[in-house]
Amino acid sequence: MKITNEAISEALLQLLRLDIAAQLPGQLVAPPAPLAREKQLQLISHAATLALSDAPEERSLAYEIAARIVETTSNDQSLIPAASFIMSRLGNFPGRQLVANRYASGAQDKPQHPLLDIESFAREMENTVHVAGESKVLTDFQMDFFELLENSDSASVSAPTSAGKSFVLSLGIIKKVSQNNNSNIVYVVPTRALLGQVTRSLLALLKKAQLSTPVRCVPIPLDPEAKSGCIYVLTQERLISLLQSFTKNQTINIMIVDEAQSVGDGSRGVLLQTAIESVRRLNPQVNIFFASPLTRNPGLLLDHFGTGVSKKILEEKHSPVLQNIILARDVHREVKQAEFFVLDDIGEHSIGRAVLSFKFRGTLSEIKSNFAKNVTKHNESAIIYCNTPSQTEETALEICSTSEDDADQDVYDFLEFIREHIHEEYSLINTLPKGVAYHYGSMPNIVRSRIEQLAKQGKLKYICCTSTLLQGINLPAKHIIIDRPRKGKTKPMGRADFLNLAGRAGRLLHEFQGNVWCLRPDTWDTPEGVSDPCFRGADTQDIKMSFFESLSNDGELLLNILRDSHSGDKESFELGVATICKLFSEFIIPGINLPSAYAKSPEAALILENLQNECKKTDFTIPKEILSLNPSVHPVRLQNLYNHMIQQNPIDLLPIYPQNKGANDRLKEIFRIISIYLEKEDNNSFKFDSWLANSWLHDTPLKSIIDQRITYLTQKAQRENKEPPVTKIEINSILDSLQQRIRFKYVKNIRAYKQILTHQLINTGKHKEAAEIIPIDLYLECGSSNPIILSLMGIGLTRTTALMLKGKVKFPDSPTPETCLGLLASTNITSLNIPGVCKNEIEELLSVGS
């Protein structure tokens, strides 16, 4: 913010430069002068006044001054009590706790004035809530949010990534369950990677509150006769599956949508919109709460989805942790020098030129790895953002190339687990001893979640991540290092994603501030239609709904996709398919005029009219409900599959339970049909896919699947006198196929296949067979058809740990997830003959681990 007092402005800029200079790699050519005592006192006094303001920018500045004063005057602790008081006045109790933890002796030696002590105590009492049998001291924003959850029917909340929204959502759920145990609550997360994290958090709070409400993260509803409600933690795909499994008297009472800005995330954004609308149709009075990071128009969500008479909006711009955006520019013909600037809402401020101990040149991975190693101090951690999974591995290995082993026993135990249960040539084995890991979506769940846990415990120093970090993964670090970032392979990162990523810098209760290092910023590309790269721009962004954006902007693209003549990228195709499917089920078939509903200009009206006319040419006989339940399947292809299946004997199309005779061949045939009609793949890829799916369904451990595939490829290469396969490449290929093809593509397609088959069975009078179709889509996503495994995964355990537990604990033949949780709670986990990594996962679930 711009400060009118010239003396304060000058002192603040000097403090800023002094603080950032101390965190730079290398040696500044001209270090800034220390801040005079008089200026320190002047700034502290100004911060104490600003902390009383209601203006977010003034409160942010008060925190910035207090945090920077603490960091730059750590040898002189006389100002520590004043900084602690400012934190209290701001309601930033995590910050105040960090002051106490780090400088307790200095704070005690300098007592505050009694009146200030009273004010601090009163502020703490105001922000204390009692949930789950414990007292929790919340920040001002968290307190406002908590009260909003209690006192409104629907709400939309916008706040920085580091503000603790998810923590308050969990507290709010526990409070609601303690008041009414009969409600069905759905907590929607954007990715499968978050399911276990949220489930474990809720189970821990329920245990402390002595509540027995079931928590499930697979779409298996409670028995309709159950005497209590249930908390479902689901992705949008799993939520749609759950709704299809509900009986007529089952409904959703409360829905929480975390990372709600995901309604603008391409095809999955359209799916999220459809899922929310489906819940509203099921129960028009459902209470819906949205949480999103730093959005300018959170009310948009309430306007479209909101219910009830008490709809409220809460916006917070003040972060409890300071994030420094630091630009590092190279110097012409000086490979070991860099120019540093810090960026704020006024502009760039030069910190100066530094002489580095490393070359600020080379490949992306070389530059980022060298920078990370030289900027990350002892007891600090760094996240290195990478555009693709292959870049994460490349960068992690680059960091390791000149690093010494620096890992504790837990990391080595994890390494041995990977060697024994994933593969002995998995690349993480080479990086973990150096305290380095990588993290992306298609990694095995147990590996990814253990990396997250070890990182939070401070046992990993460097994590190389892709955009999975943008989707709510709780993986903060002191430093985030970025160079020419993209979201995916081609699109430059946008401002909203950059802000979300930057919000991960700085760990609450561990640091006062975090650093976002933007390397060689002048080389960054800008997103289409935007003039600035993502490190510049407004601090809040508009939520946009992908469905409406696609209708408004991509008329010709939609026409090409409708005609099945699209030749562009996969992402635009998937968004177009989702848009057209929703358009058919909600506009074309019901007869709603599309141009009059959504045209914002004469040009747009013409495009939408052409699209509507083209849609009407399609001869649709498929039931509307099948179309609406499959919003990510091409509607014309869905009709073609329907035309094929209604000509067959439906009994011959039934999936067979995986353990029964003929199941493998039947699944292979189903995959072939899907490949022809829904994917239009004119090849034999379905044969490999069906082999992989059958191995996955038969509880085959991941290492065995990988070994079988590599053995097959090796023998094939020998027969054909070709080079043997590269093991590391094939490992990643198997993992990617499992995630992208089996657990995503075939799951959504088999769901459509099942619904057409059910319709045909009912139409031919085979109601019993229709009711008994096995949930092969659920089996495929979870990787098992065993009811014990499914129930263990339903409480948040990974497939690997669930497989390890089978046979080690005496479960009933068909237990509920809650039965499994109860049996685990009464089991001596340490005595089980299973890997330590699996024990750790179970103990964390039971809230008895570290």
Image (cartoon, grey):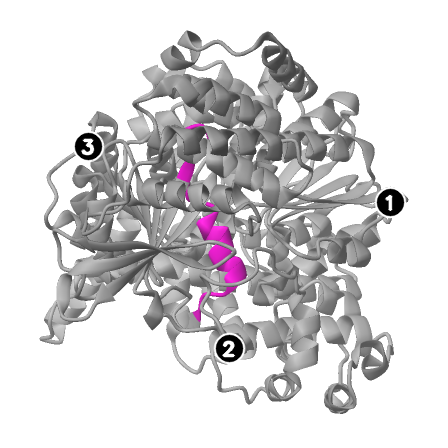
Q: Nearer the viewer, residue 187 or 160?
A: 160
Name the secondary structure under disc 3: loop
Estimate the x, y position of residue 702 in percent, counting from the top left: 32, 47
Name the secondary structure under disc 2: loop
Residue 377 part of the magenta segment: no
- Segment tinted magenta in the rendering: 492-513
Q: Please state which amino acid type lies under the numbered disc 1.
A: Gln
Q: Is residue 312 left or right of residue 161?
A: right
Residue 811 visible in the displayed image: no
Q: Dot 1 corresponds to which residue?
A: 285
Of the image marks 3 and 1, the number of the one nearer the N terminus: 1
Q: Please state which amino acid type lies under the numbered disc 3.
A: Ala
Name the residue rendered at 73%, 21% in the picture: 178
Of the image marks 2 and 1, the number of the one nearer the N terminus: 1
Q: Dot 3 corresponds to which residue?
A: 407
Foreground mark, 2 or 1, reads: 2
Quarter of the image holding residue 213?
top right
Q: Please state which amino acid type lies under the numbered disc 2.
A: Glu
Residue 495 part of the magenta segment: yes
Name the secondary structure under disc 1: loop
Q: Is residue 195 left or right of residue 842?
A: right
Q: Residues within 10 Å of mark 2 (few under 14, many from 20)?
A: few
Q: Dot 2 corresponds to which residue?
A: 528
Quarter of the image holding residue 454?
top left
Estimate the x, y position of residue 839 in percent, counting from the top left: 36, 25
Cα–Cα gap, marks 2 and 1: 40 Å
